[in-house]
Image (cartoon, rainbow, N blue to C red):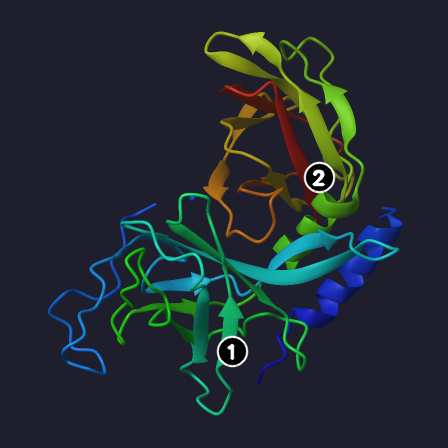
């Protein structure tokens, strides 16, 4: 079944985001052809160029099937979907040959898609943007094995890659909560706050659900850091997630109880430019004061979207 269970929730959340809510490179070498590969004509040598890095990586699984971005090409900016693939080669390539072919290996009845990429100035990196299809709002389907055929590419000497040159990857399922948070990074104006130097320096509140915060950190040993506050729900325990725009050490403390709180800082699956990591923890009911201690980190600013529930 092609429609994801996340579709209805995402559309609802995207609409809320537009109106306001009230409440990471291994070296990869797919077979890009060698001088011993026999092409259609065994007398014609293939290029010795190889793929040194690729995003997604060769054989990668659980690739997010889409990326969200703000399309401002029309009169009214809208949140749109695409998927960007990149390939870097071991030597300069022919910039006039930039077509690749995307094959659906899970459903072989789906027609292959010919895509045209763009080369970097040095002719070594090809960027391919996969747009949404006419039949779907998504550029790629969930839980699907894809092959990106590269045999139409040529090196700077005009030699084509091997007929078997390809990049294989498999998409995973969608995450409606992550997509919802991404809508806020795309359309919400950040609420600027300045972190407290210490827990006793009146740390600003950063506890509004769906809000996007831009926190100015203070100079500390090793970079920048500081504190912000969070007030728990009066009646209910909650699962809280901070969707961060960068990696930053984050410690959570229940200041009311005087105890440290178990939290998890982890990379996020790439879906939008504004979210790279998440911090998750559980809060206790009763209007208790929690403190977020950020840093030390090299950047003076950190942004995050607050989601609680």
- The residue shown at (60%, 44%) is 273
- Within 10 Å of disc 2 (Cα), the crowding (few <14, some 14-19, many 20+) is some
- The residue shown at (75%, 21%) is 193
- Within 10 Å of disc 1 (Cα), the crowding (few <14, some 14-19, many 20+) is some
Choose top left, top right, bottom left or bottom right for residue 28: bottom left
Residue 231 showing in the rendered view: no
Judging by the rendered image, the residue that carries numbered circle 2 is 285
Q: Position of residue 112 (x, y in %)?
A: 48, 82
Q: Position of residue 285 (x, y in %)?
A: 71, 39
Element carrying mark 1: strand
Q: Position of residue 219 (x, y in %)?
A: 58, 8
Q: Is residue 257 above or below residue 3?
A: above
- The residue shown at (30%, 63%) is 158
Q: Report the side of 107 relative to 206 (left or right).
A: left
Q: Position of residue 304 (x, y in %)?
A: 65, 36
Judging by the rendered image, the residue that carries numbered circle 1 is 113
Choose top left, top right, bottom left or bottom right for residue 169: bottom left
Q: Is residue 255 above or below residue 32?
A: above
Choose top left, top right, bottom left or bottom right for residue 234: top right
Closer to the camera: disc 1 or disc 2?
1
Element carrying mark 2: loop
Name the outermost residue toward the left.
36
Quick one: 304 or 95, which is closer to the camera? Answer: 95
- The residue shown at (27%, 50%) is 90
Choose the circle earlier in sequence order: 1 or 2: 1
* 3D distance between C-alphas at marks 1 and 2: 52 Å
């Amino acid at each position: 079944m092609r429609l994801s269970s996340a579709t209805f929730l995402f559309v609802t959340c995207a609409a809320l985001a537009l109106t306001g809510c009230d409440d990471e490179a291994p070296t990869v070498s797919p077979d890009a052809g060698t001088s011993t590969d026999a092409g259609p004509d065994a007398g014609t040598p293939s290029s010795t160029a190889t793929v040194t890095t690729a995003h997604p990586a060769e054989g990668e699984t659980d690739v997010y099937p889409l990326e969200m971005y703000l399309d401002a090409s029309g009169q009214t900016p809208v949140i749109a979907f695409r998927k960007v693939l990149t390939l870097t080669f071991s030597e300069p390539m022919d910039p006039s040959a930039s077509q690749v072919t995307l094959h659906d290996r899970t459903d072989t009845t789906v027609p292959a898609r010919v895509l045209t990429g763009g080369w970097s100035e040095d002719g070594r990196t090809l960027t391919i943007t996969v747009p949404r299809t006419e039949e779907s709002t998504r550029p790629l389907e969930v839980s699907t094995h894809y092959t990106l055929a590269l045999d139409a590419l040529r090196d700077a000497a005009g030699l084509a890659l091997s007929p078997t040159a390809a990049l294989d990857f498999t998409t995973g399922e969608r995450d409606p909560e992550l997509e919802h948070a991404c809508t806020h990074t795309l359309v919400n104006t950040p609420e600027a706050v300045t972190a407290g130097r210490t827990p006793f320096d009146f740390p600003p509140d950063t506890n509004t659900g769906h809000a996007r915060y831009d926190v100015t950190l203070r100079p500390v040993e090793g970079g920048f850091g500081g504190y912000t506050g969070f007030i728990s729900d009066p009646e209910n325990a909650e699962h809280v997630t901070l969707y961060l725009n960068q990696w930053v050490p984050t410690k959570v403390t229940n200041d009311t109880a005087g105890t440290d709180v178990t939290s998890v800082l982890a990379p996020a699956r790439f879906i939008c430019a504004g979210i790279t990591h998440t911090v998750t923890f559980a809060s206790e009911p009763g209007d208790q004061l929690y403190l977020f201690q950020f840093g030390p980190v090299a950047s003076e600013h950190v942004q995050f979207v607050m989601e609680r529930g």
